[in-house]
């Protein structure tokens, strides 16, 4: 079994989609191993999105992700990393995510794409340490 770091981003929380996201994770057969509602400070956000530092959208992204409460989770199960990426859909909710995915069903804009999921085992290890250092 494998672990992945999932965020319901501030847009997902403010739109009341936390239950919807968790329901899809659970129906898929994945398990919650940790869950917390919190507001990310700038240091956590910059560490989480370090790979995007310097890109044109980076400052907006950090402002957005620190702009309100989010839900951070560790999700566990067989092939959890790719299983959740499939549930989330592609980064652009209109051009890439297909209907039936979280982003495809609920998103319109790239920045406000509702959820994050780790993209590799290395990212998952790194991100779980950032959000849940005690795990
Ligand atoms: P995450 O799971 O959030 O990491 O999304 P991803 O892996 O599908 O995309 P990526 O890591 O490439 O980008 C991280 C996040 O930055 C995306 O989820 C978007 O919220 C945001 N983002 C990516 N590209 C753009 C862009 O061109 N413009 C804006 N405004 N935001 C972007
Ligand atoms: Mg990513």
Image (cartoon, helix red, strand yellow):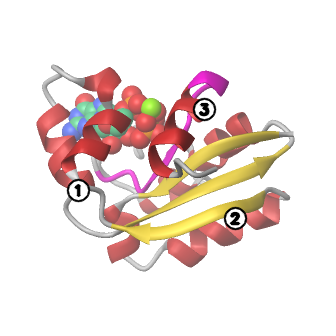
Q: Secondary structure at mark 1?
A: loop
Q: Is residue 42 left or right of residue 48?
A: left
Report the span colored magenta: 112-122
Residue that mark 3 sits on: 125
Element marked by disc 2: helix
Asked whether residue 105 is in view, the answer is yes
Going from N to C along the chain, the mark reached first, 3 or 2, is: 2
Which is nearer the N-term, disc 1 or disc 3? 1
> Between marks 1 and 2, how big is the CA–CA gap?
25 Å
| Residue depicted at x 69% and y 64% | 24
Residue 131: x, y in percent? 47, 50
The structure residue drawn at horizontal position 69% and vertical position 37%, both measured from the top left corner, is 81
**Residue 57 placement, left or right of 86:** left
Report whether 40 appears left or right of 60. right
- Eyeballing the image, is 84 above or below 48? below
What residue appears at the point 22 percent right and 23 percent down from the top-left corner? 53
Q: Is residue 134 magenta?
A: no
Number of the label disc, if any, that sits on residue 24: 2
Residue nearer the viewer, 27 or 117: 117
Tell whether position 119 is magenta: yes
Would residue 43 appear left or right of 49 to someone viewing this image? left
Look at the image and tell me whether residue 100 can be seen.
no
**CA gap, disc 3 and disc 2:** 23 Å
Which picture quadrant has residue 16?
bottom left
Where ligand 1 lies, by quadrant?
top left
Label 1 close to label 2 by CB (< 8 Å): no
Q: Earlier in the sequence, mark 1 or mark 2?
A: 2
What residue did someone put label 1 on?
66
Q: What is the x, y in percent for residue 1?
A: 87, 39
């Amino acid at each position: 079994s494998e672990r992945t770091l999932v965020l319901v981003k501030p847009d997902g929380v403010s739109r009341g989609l936390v239950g919807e996201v968790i329901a899809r994770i659970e129906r898929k057969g994945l398990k919650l191993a940790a869950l917390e509602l919190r507001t990310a400070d700038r240091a956590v956000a910059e560490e989480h999105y370090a790979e995007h530092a310097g890109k044109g959208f980076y400052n907006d992204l950090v402002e957005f992700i620190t702009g309100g409460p989010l839900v951070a989770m560790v999700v566990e199960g067989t092939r959890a990393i790719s299983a959740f990426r499939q549930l989330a859909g592609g980064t652009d909710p209109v051009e890439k995510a297909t209907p039936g995915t979280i982003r495809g069903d609920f998103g319109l804009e790239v920045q406000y794409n509702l959820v994050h999921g780790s993209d590799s085992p290395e990212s998952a290890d790194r991100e779980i340490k950032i959000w849940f250092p005690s795990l």
